Image (tube, rainbow, N blue to C red):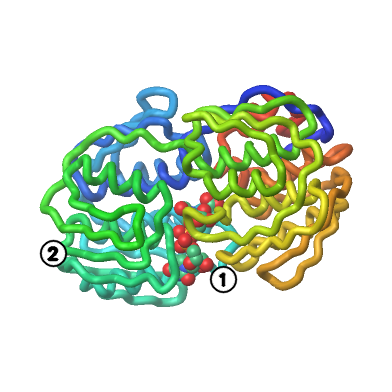
Amino acid sequence: MKFVIQGGEKLEGEIEVMGAKNAALKIFPIVFLTDEKIRVSNVPDIEDCSRAEEMLLAMGHEVKKVGKGIVEIQRKSNKCVDLPEDLMNKFRASLMFVGPMLVSCGEVNFPHPGGCVIGAGTRPIDFFLDGFLKMGAKVRISENRYRITAKKLLGAEIFFPKITVTGTESLMMTAVKAYGTTVLKNAAMEPEITALADFLNSIGAKIEGAGTPTIKIQGVKKLGGGEYGIIPDRIEAGTFAILAAASKGGPITVKNCDPSHLEALWSLFDRIGVKYKLGNTEIKIFPGRGLKSSDVATHEYPGFATDLQQPYTVLMTQAKGSSLVHEAIYDRRLLFADSLTQMGANIIMADPHRIVVSGPTKLHGRKLISPDLRAGIALVLAGLVAEGKTEIDNIYQIDRGYEKVDERLKGLGADIKRV
Ligand code: EPZ
């Protein structure tokens, strides 16, 4: 499947933001922490969520769709099974099942998780394994497969060498029923982590400090069931706001989002001269006249999100001047810049973590392939801004994280077809 885009259309109107992929994917594994039913709402209809639901079903648990974006999940067997390998290879967040399964079964076997091509090598999981070891588990590694066992999980003090989002979430979830208290230090502070902690506390966990660098978890015996409304996807909201800033049409309102999760982007918008108005649950962006360029470095939350780096790079091709884009979190997350250069952008690869974008340059449509979901959506943005026809192949990678994005972009007047 591919997207075919005729660029240059004047975009205007409203676009709705869905529930956050990186919040939703952390709720499914909670079925291993409680026997009660969990009702999740505002679940985005994206490939990664379908894979997570398939994982639960494959392991014999219940997944019931009870309405648009509303799913009821519940553990239905205490059988300890291996994580489905074919599904583990499809998305990184499959790793989130490991900790909770270790809690409920005392043993978990799995291959190295797949997903995006970004990150050093095959995106290491050493921080997870070190955390499980500190909590008393045994870890055996044999050619790309892991076997972790733990008769009893004990509270521990865990310092993360690098800030890791899923590492923080995974060990927070593993600690909620451990014996004693766990302290996570140098923890990630993303809004999805605070939301996860709030939900776990609402079903009986004892977690303090989520959203700060130090999170304290007191182990409890049992967790109940409850409802969880997934927070809006700040990366979708930021991506659409950047598209609006790059467009030449009328005002664009990004709806159903939480602007307070995107302070770093608004401060960038102020620097480059984007006109916008923040509401409580929406942002209205007015068409950019002459945008100025500005350097940016990606940083853990609340800094500028690495998941917005690629869309921002596209925006900088349309801004006046040169901007240094420093991708400080991941290796290989700048490779997509080659595609922009093919479209006519003026980008110099200074080193694997830094590029210099000079603009404004006219982009021309090309045949492209989406390497991962964030680069993929950036290529869609480039296609919308470019002159002529752009074809983007491998759009499974885009559908992993953006629900029916072609339909929603058509709502703004974009000429985009899924063929
Ligand atoms: C989460 O990935 C998100 N994924 C990513 O979004 C996001 O880009 C990233 O956080 C940073 O915000 C999910 O939540 C499913 P990290 P995560 O662990 O947790 C290194 C998307 O497109 N590291 O914070 O896997 C790692 O290589 C995805 O939705 C280790 O070295 O990212 C990276 O350099 C892309 N060892 C750095 O830490 C480990 O054990 C940060 O990675 C774990 C991570």
User: Could you say whether the residue bearing mark 1 is in a helix, strand or loop?
Assistant: loop
Residue type marked 1 = Ala
Q: Which label was assigned to residue 180?
A: 2
User: Could you say whether the residue bearing mark 2 is in a helix, strand or loop?
Assistant: loop
Q: Position of residue 75 (x, y in %)?
A: 24, 42
**Marks 2 and 1: which is nearer the front?**
2
Q: Position of residue 215 (x, y in %)?
A: 28, 59
Mark 2 C-beta to ligand 1 under 8 Å: no
Residue at horizontal 37%, vertical 31%? 41
189 sits left or right of 1 in the view = left
Eyeballing the image, is 11 above or below 217?
above
Q: What is the CA distance from the residue labelled 2 to the residue labelled 1? A: 34 Å
Q: Position of residue 180 (x, y in %)?
A: 13, 64
Is residue 394 visible from the viewing direction of this image?
no
81 sits left or right of 380 in the view = left
In front: 260, or 76?
260
**Residue identified by numbered label 1:** 120
Residue type marked 2 = Gly
In front: 8, or 118?
8
Eyeballing the image, is 158 above or below 240?
below
Mark 1 C-beta to ligand 1 under 8 Å: yes
Q: Position of residue 354 (x, y in %)?
A: 69, 67
